[in-house]
Structure formats: structure tokens, C-alpha cells
Image (cartoon, rainbow, N blue to C red):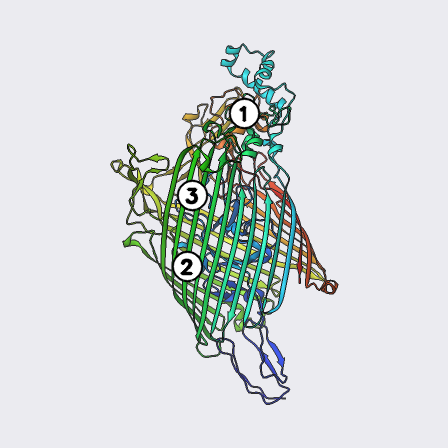
Amino acid sequence: MGTKQGTVTDVNGRYSIGITSESAALTFSFIGFNSQTITLNSSNTVNVSLTATSKQLGEVLVTGYSTQTRSTTTGAIAQVNAKAFEDRSYTSADQALQGRVAGLQSTGSSGQPGALQEVRIRGIGSINANSNPLYVVDGIIINSGDLSRIGATTANALSGINPNDIETITVLKDASAAAIYGSRAANGVIVITTKSGKAGKTKIRLDAEFGLTKPGVVRSVNRPLTTDEYRTLTAEGLLNNPSYISQYGLTSSNVLQFVDENFGTNSGVNTNWLDLVQRTAHQQQYNLSVDGGDAKTQFHVSGGYFKQQGVVINSDFNRYSANIDLKHKVNDKLSFATSLIIGQNGQNTPPNGNAYENPVFAAYALPSSISPYNPDGSYNIDPSTFPSSNYNPLFTGAHDKNRLSQLKGLGSASGEYKILTNLKITSRIGIDYNNLEEDAYLNPVYGDGAGLGGLSARYYTRYFNWVWTNLVDYRIDLNHNHNWTGDIKAGYESQKSQYYDLNVTTIGFPANYNITVPSNGSTPLEALGTNEDYTVASLLALGDFSYKGKYVVSGSFRKDGSSRFGADNRYGNFWSVGGTWNGQKEAFFKDINWISVLRARATYGTTGNANIGNYNWRNLYSYGIYNGVSYNYNGLGGSAPTSVGNPNLTWETNKQLNLGFDFAVFKDRLSLTFDWYNRQATNLLLDQPTSLTTGFSSFTNNIGSMRNRGFEVTLSGTPVKAGGFRWDAGFNISKNNNKILALVNGKDQVNGSFINREGMDVQTFYLRQWAGVDPATGNALWYTDATQMQTTTDYNTAAQVAKYSASPKVFGSFTSTFAYKGISLDGLLYYNFGNYIQDGDAADTQSDGYYPSENRGAGQLNRWQKPGDVTNTPKYVFDNSSKSSFVSSRFLYKGDYARLRELTLAYTFPTALISTAKLSSLRIYVRGTNLATWIRDKNLPGDPEAGITSYTNFNITMPKIFTAGINVGF
């Protein structure tokens, strides 16, 4: 028996101990970590890293201002690692978040490559202010959202960052986690950490991927009609319109001849325009990275190329990217770090919506009887063969353009100095730069530009944002035995964001499709420009304290001053408190080995929303031309007031309570995380009516309130692990209830198809209620009021009713990974239930004859034709005036769906097999994206993924993507 000695490390993990025997052994232990015993040798230095008894508790979370382990956090934080982003067919990382994080709703509305992805964390947080989360990349608060200024297209700001360069994405959901970001954290915070070098042997990795992209499935109810179907429907519609019968003497025996003579339906042409404007597209990406270093210097360098064709003509996206990260330790006290991310994007985008230049809209609107080509093979652009204001999309797609070029740069430099072993200061400055050039051109020969002699517009936009952060970090170990520990940070942060734009539009161009820049136009149409900026200055502090790792309390405080508000309301205070109990570390759990995690969490705090215009608090005047209105007079420059300010304007404030529970058993073979939250937004920025004598109808004021309340469940585990086979599975579900609590004077606010009403969801539809079709007459019916006791055939007398919501009741995902000896199969199934979708296409595709010369969707074949027919589609009337296709609940559909978002089959070669080729790793894979979709409502005509507002509008469908790739490590 030998003697025993003991010691404890300091706050930085350093220790010393006197040993007399060369055969001694050191045992390292700490609560919540696996003990490790090291037998001594001749070395005087022994370095050890302990692993957590639970992988969950040992997980390192990067929250922007601090780095914590899971066991010391009090807030609702989720983290997604690089595996979810690497080698994916997504143009931006937010697309890869769909289904990965409970409480985070990530949804697209267009299959356009590079399009905006809408993200909401724990519901919609505001009525008028922006509800987007705050994005932070490597400590830099960045611009996000749609950067495009051509209203018919979208460009995602995050698409300038290569997802393969991302190490982790951390989602801060509650006030305890997000309040340190203060006035901009009300909608949650998404912290992106890019890859960096690590000490060790230099590693080289090469990734290559190729694939095909196919259009999403067109549902049979919405396919365009064939020529014969269009011919029959048009003839029937003419006979259902008495004025056409009397005017042209139409009868059942001559109506088809009339249709053939006037609509060319006897030409033998049956064009599928949708097939012509859609295509099987190609995709490719390549990524090369090199990283390594030693104890003093670490580096990471990477470059990438990504190209994705869209499934609709004249749509594509490409990106060149580079990432450089360098860290250097000068000595034990001083270290520096710098990083640079560069992305150069190019994007071609056709117009969206029911614009005649939108090839998707044209494909539905053009009758199949029209040939796209002339006999000589040239494009058919004879206006007499096309319906009024409709054009051949093949010609306009070839000669018109909407082109966007984006240069994104993210750079930072930081320094750290250790004053004492437990006291350090850090200073970091970061820059976010976005430069966009957009070109729109309408040719002078054909299409919307023909009447203007051609049109060219050029938009230049620049966003420049810098953030300077200075922090003092003090770590505490009161008794020098790790029983009472803490970490306190305090600092100052300043930010300045500048915005500059300029656009020039001219008309009158020669019939030369290569002359497209505005300076070649004969007549200037407009020249506009804007300069804006805002600043934020902040004091911040955060800290967490722990007793033996069992009890953790945390708190944060931030005082923000923003130029977006008046001098008397420029500063706001935001704070949070939280506590965690790690029950598995209690002495009475010592013998309960099958429980690895038992944690209870509670947090409360306030955050703010300042996502409004930079000058809403001021009375504004505009000079020259503003929003198409000229204030000039008699050749002289003029000005006029354009908005009413409010010097008392201040932030929207979110007060959030979060209660959480984490549980894991059998060494994390099964784990559960549950969070319940109550998030109340006050001081909502709403439009308050004002006297018309001011020249304005309203001004912005802090007057409303709204609540989001719900729960999140994440379940993961390893059901099978035996004989080299492993099955990992996961499930998450999120439920959020939104309720408006207060509006201006309690009065409803109607916004298009939606209504804001106290006591209801913020996305409640406000529509005339469809009552179906009269079986005796085939006429459309609507309910007269909310009781649905009486019906009417008069659209104008039908009452609008607040009913149904675009917000889902629940959403989430199932994940599964099977692995056996290098072979793996993993998939993600995303689901969304409880919302309703409004079909914005229906006014054209299901118009019941309102646009008589345009084509229809196949749903019109289910029309009423004779007394006694029971159907939901009214009789077809040529030049219909019944308003049956006008906005109503007729075109609301249940939005329930489940989609196989990802499925990947991969093989990783054994090290022994590839080592002779000097390779450290080799993996090949095939992947499918959006492979299959289950839709509950069989009558839903389009894609169920229709954005946050659940609205379709002739968007490019979500494509199916098939890729194959290889990862090689050296």
C-alpha cells in the first residue's frame, strides 16, 4: 500500500504536485467527468483532458460572447454541427436548418437558387417590425434577409457564406441565452461559427459533388389543360353566357367551329408550356481546405465553387468563396486572431408572381393551342396568336434579364491579453460588407419592354457594417477547489451600419439585344439614390456561477443606445436571470448509474426589437422624385413631407419565461429535452390614426402587445448498437400559440387577406366564406355571415370572416441513421401540420372563365355542368362576371404535409485500405433532397412549402435534387 497525496488545479486547469516515487500514478477526477489514471514516467509534465460522463453535458456551445459547456448553461440553446451543412445542395446554411432545431421554423417559398429562406424562432414576434432573428457570424452582427431591390426577385444575404465553411450554428431561443444581444434579440439569435485551424498535422480535404435537379411534381389538379380540354371548356363557357349566344348566334352545333376560328384550337398544336419552361438542371460544387498548426500558430484556409441551375429557364446561382482563419499565440499572455470570409455570387432570376414575364405564370396562362415556334424554327412572337398582354416565355427568357451580382466580405481581427491567470481582456473589430449590382433589361422588340422601346435599370446597393467589441473576462474559483466557480464578463460594444443605393432607369433602345446598359437608352426615366446609417452603442455584462457543478445561476445585462430612436428614448436596458440544477451530480444519485443527465432549468428576461426604419422617429421630407411622385415644380427642385415622425418612439420589448428539463439515461442511449416558454411582446410598433389635417392618415407608435406561448420536445437515442451495427434516431416537435393581446383602441387592422384582431393569431385569414356551388344552377355561393346559416350568390354582400390561420400548429422532424462497417444511411423527414395555405394562383388557373382567353388548370374539369351535379367548382362561363374566382376561402387548403427532406447513402473506406495511397480518409455518397412529399389535402394545387405567410403565387416549385460526391482527406 502506498501513500496518497492530493491537489487541485487553478481556474485555468494548471496544477503542481510533489512526487517521490517514479512508479507513482496520478488519478484525475472532477464531478461530471470520467476519471483518468496516468502512470508516471521520467517526464515532469503530465497533461490530461477529461471527458464528460455525458456527451450532452460536455458539449461545447458557442454563444457569441462566451463559450460554455451544456452543463453550465441555463438557457434554451440548440446547436447544429458541420455534418448538417457539409456537401449539401443548399445555397445557404439557413436552408439546412429546416427540421434540425425544435422551435425554429425554416421555410422557403420558391425553388429559385439563392432565394430567401424565412426563419422564425418561437413564432412571429411582431406585427409591423421585422420578425427575423439576429445573425452573428464569428462575433460579427451581420445584415440578413432579402438584399435584392428588384421586387420580383429574391436574394438571400446568407448565400454569400459557403455552408461548407461552417463549424457550428448555435440557436439562442430564450431570454437567458439571447438577452446579452439586447435591443435586437427579441426574435432569437443565430450564432454561426466558421471553421478554424487546430494544432497538429496539416490536413488537406477535397470535396467534389455533381448532381441533377428536377422540377417538383405538378399536382394533377393544377396541370395546364390540353388543347382539346381548353376547346371543350371554352365552348361550354360560351354557351353559358347569354350575351355571346345572342351576339354571335351560338348553338351547340356551331360553337366548336367558333372556338376553332377564334382561338386556333384546330391547329393540331398541343403545347405543354410547363414542360418548355422547366428543365432538368445540373449542379456541381467543389471545396478544398487546408488546416493545421502547432501550439503557437493554427491556420485554416479553404476555397469553394458552387453552381446550381434552376429548374425554370433563365434561373441559376453560382458562388466563389474563400475562408482564411489564423490564430497566433505570441507568449503565455498575448495572442491574436484574424479571419476573412469572401463570397462572390452571381444569380439569374426570372420575375415571380403573376407578372407576364414570369415563365411559370406564362406556362399556366398560355393556351396549349399556341405554338412556341414558327415553321422556320424561330420563336413565335406574333401578337395575334397570344392572349392580350401574354408573351412567349421562351423569347423573353432568352432576351430579357434579371441579373444580380453580390460581393460579400466578412473580416475580423482580435487580440487577447491575460493580465492574470484568471483575468483577461479581449478586443475584436469585425466588418460585414455587402456590395450588390442588379441589372434588369426588357428588350425593345417583344414583351413588356416593347411599348417602351426597351427598358434598362441598374441598381447598385452597398451595406457596410462594423462592430467593435471590448470585453474583460474574470474567472473565479473561490476556494481553489472548483467547488465555487464563476465567470464574469463585462464590456463595451459599438456598431455603425451604413446603407447606400443608387438606381438609374432609361428607355428607348435599339433592336440589338447586346446593348443593355442604361446609358444606351435614349430617354432617362428616373435616377434615384439613398444614403442611410444607424449606430448602436452598448454596455454589457454577463456571468454564471456554479457550486460543484450542481447548481448554476446566470445573469446578463445590456444597455443599448440606438440612433433609430429619439434623444429621450434612445437608451434601453435588457437583462436576464437563470438557474440550472444538475441533479445527476447530487450525492444521492451516485449509485444510480443508468441516469447520465437530470437537469432542470428556469430563466426569465427581456429583449428588444429595433427592426424598423432608421428614421421613423423623425419628420421626413423628400426632394425631387420619391416613390414615383415628383415634388419638382416648373423645372426647379422641390420637396414635401413624406412621413410623420414620433420622437417618443422606442423599442418593442419581449418578456420571456422559459422552463426546461433535460434527461438522459443509459450513457446517453436515450435523451430528452423539453422546454415550455411564454413570450410576451409589448410596445408593439403599430400605425395609429392621426388627424387628416396633417396630410397623413397615421403615424407609428408603441401601443400594442402580443403573446407567443408553446413547448418544444427533442428526443434522441441509439435504439440498436451491436456487432458493428448502430442505429441512431431522433425526433422533435414544436407547438406555438400566437395571440394578439392589444391593438390601437382595440380596433381590427386588415392587411390584404389577413386581419389583426385582439384574441386571435397574427396570421388569421379574413376572407369571404365559400359555401360551395348550388347543385341546381351551378352558381357560386358564399355565406352571408359567420353563422353560416344563409348563403348568397352576390360576392359583394358576403361578409368577411376571421377564420383559419397561416401559422402551423405543430412542426418538427424525424431523423434516422443506420451505420454498419463504413456503410451509412441517414435521412431527415420534415413535417408541418395545422396551417392553411392560400392559393394565389387560383385567380388565374381556376378563374371559371373570368380571363376567358387564357388557359386553365385541370381543376376546372370538375365544374358543374347540369342540374344535380355536386361539385365545388362552379359552372364555367366565358367572360365570367360572378366573381367566383375572387379572393375567398374557396382557395384555402389545409397545409399539412411531410417531406423526405434528405436521404444519404455513404461509404467510408477503412483506414487500412486507403493508407497505402497516402490518404487519411475517403468517403463516397449519393444523396436525394426533397425526394418525396405527402400532402394531406388532395385538392391543394401547389407545393405545401409556401413561406411563413402560406401563400402561393406562381413561384418555382421546390426541386428534387439528386447528387453524388466524394470526400478525400490527405
Q: Amino acid at mark 1?
A: Glu
Single out the residue that lies furthest toward the bottom. Answer: 20
Q: Nearer the observer, disc 1 or disc 2?
A: 2
Tell me residue 445's x, y (percent): 52, 28
Q: Nearer the observer, disc 2 or disc 3?
A: 2
Horizontal relation, residue 84 to residue 647: left or right: right
Disc nearer the start of the sequence (3/1) = 3
Q: Amino acid at mark 2?
A: Val
Of 570 and 802, the residue lying toward us? 570
Q: Give the Cα distance between marks 3 and 1.
A: 36 Å
To which quarter of the image does residue 503 belong? top left
Residue 467 is tagged as 2
Tell me residue 746's x, y (percent): 33, 41
Disc nearer the start of the sequence (2/3) = 2
Question: Mark 1 — residue?
Answer: 854
Mark 1 burial class by Cα count in 10 Å: few <14, some 14-19, many 20+: many
Q: Quadrant of the C terminus?
A: bottom right
To which quarter of the image does residue 687 belong? top left
Q: Nearer the observer, disc 3 or disc 1?
A: 1
Residue 135, compared with residue 917, is above or below; it is: above
- The answer to whether marks 3 and 1 mark residues whose Cβ atoms lie closer than 8 Å is no
Residue 762 is tagged as 3
SS assignment at label 1: loop
- The answer to whether marks 2 and 3 mark residues whose Cβ atoms lie closer than 8 Å is no
Mark 2 burial class by Cα count in 10 Å: few <14, some 14-19, many 20+: many
Tell me residue 858's x, y (percent): 59, 28
Q: Amino acid at mark 3?
A: Val
Residue 549, compared with residue 268, is above or below; it is: below
SS assignment at label 3: loop
SS assignment at label 2: strand
Q: Give the Cα distance between marks 1 and 2.
A: 54 Å
Tell me residue 732's x, y (percent): 56, 53
